[in-house]
Image: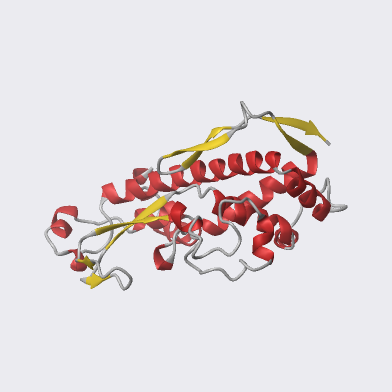
């Protein structure tokens, strides 16, 4: 893939840099990796071949697995909560067959609350890791951090911390985002990370979730497959996989 991009004409490369993420990454490839590797981190320019490959792999894995996992949780949770599913269908109103525009998808307030609650209740990425860039001390505990340390941020625990959620955080309740939990702490819900290093694909991921869940709700109803097969639970790895999901599907 790298060689294919590099073989293109300068004019085509310049055009693709504006529209293709892969082309942009390849364009940032270091011309002399050995020379750059000998420099300090803050003096290096561009990305090594290995870094480019890692970035491409991350886009492929993160773009597929996290979205598909979130959709699985959505199906499981609404099958256990028919009231929520009925409210989504009611919000769709007469738009039960047509494809909706981005503006129409954004106007579905309750569906957006359900998606936010799904990402809170079972964040696909259960944790993230950040490297400390300067010596610092945590204000709450006084723990000393040093430059180069790795800090793991437990995204899942933040979503269940009762200090940050007024309504029981162990309860799946989308209406929380229309009420007292609407103005929650901004870092109590970070399914895509936070700060200037948060996921660059989060807008695309949210759009995918809205589009797919809307089409599902336009055409099918999910029912609880029973306690044995639809018991929920999770397998906690990097992504928070549902453990037992079994639903019935009725075409509307």
Answer above or below: position of 136 versus 44.
below
Residue placed farthest to the right in the image? 94
Residue situated furthest top in the rendering: 228
Colouring mode (rainbow / by chain / secondary structure / one colour): secondary structure
Residue 62 at what x, y percent from top left?
46, 46
In the depicted view, which residue is nearer to us: 10 or 115?
A: 115
Spot occupied by residue 203 in the image (x, y as percentages of width and height): 56, 59
Q: Quadrant of the C terminus?
A: top right
Residue 247: x and y in percent read 68, 31
Count the numbered circles shown: 0
Q: Residue furthest left?
A: 38
Q: Quadrant of residue 39?
A: bottom left
Q: Residue at left 65%, top 61%?
A: 176
- Left or right of 127, for residue 73: right
User: Image check: 143 left or right of 62?
Assistant: left
Q: Position of 115 compared to 33: left or right?
A: right
* Picture quarter with the N terminus: top left
Quadrant of the rendered structure where residue 166 is? bottom right
Q: Nearer the viewer, residue 96 or 79?
A: 79
Residue name at image x 22 percent, y 60 percent = 149
Residue 8 location, x and y as percent? 40, 50
Front residue of 105 and 26: 105
Q: Nearer the viewer, residue 125 or 141?
A: 141
């Amino acid at each position: 893939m790298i060689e294919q991009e590099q073989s293109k004409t300068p004019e085509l490369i310049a055009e693709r840099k504006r529209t293709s993420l892969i082309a942009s990454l390849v364009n940032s490839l270091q011309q002399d990796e050995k020379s750059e590797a000998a420099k300090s981190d803050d003096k290096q320019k561009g990305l090594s071949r290995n870094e480019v490959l890692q970035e491409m792999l991350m886009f492929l894995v993160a773009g597929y697995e996290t979205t598909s996992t979130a959709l699985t949780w959505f199906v499981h949770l609404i099958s256990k909560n028919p009231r929520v599913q009925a409210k989504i269908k009611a919000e769709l109103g007469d738009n039960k067959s047509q494809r909706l525009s981005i503006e129409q998808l954004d106007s579905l307030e309750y569906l957006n609350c359900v998606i936010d609650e799904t990402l809170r209740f079972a964040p696909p990425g259960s944790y993230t890791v950040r490297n400390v860039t300067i010596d610092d001390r945590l204000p709450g505990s006084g723990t000393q951090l040093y430059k180069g340390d790795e800090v793991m941020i437990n995204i899942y625990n933040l979503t269940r911390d009762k200090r940050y959620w007024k309504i029981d955080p162990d309860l799946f309740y989308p209406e929380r985002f229309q009420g007292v939990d609407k103005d929650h702490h901004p870092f109590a819900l970070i399914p895509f990370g936070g700060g200037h290093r948060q996921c660059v694909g989060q807008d695309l991921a949210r759009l995918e979730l809205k589009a797919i869940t809307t089409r599902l709700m336009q055409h099918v109803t999910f029912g609880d497959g029973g306690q044995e097969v639809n018991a929920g639970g999770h397998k906690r790895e990097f992504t928070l996989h549902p453990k037992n999901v079994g639903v019935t599907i009725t075409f509307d």
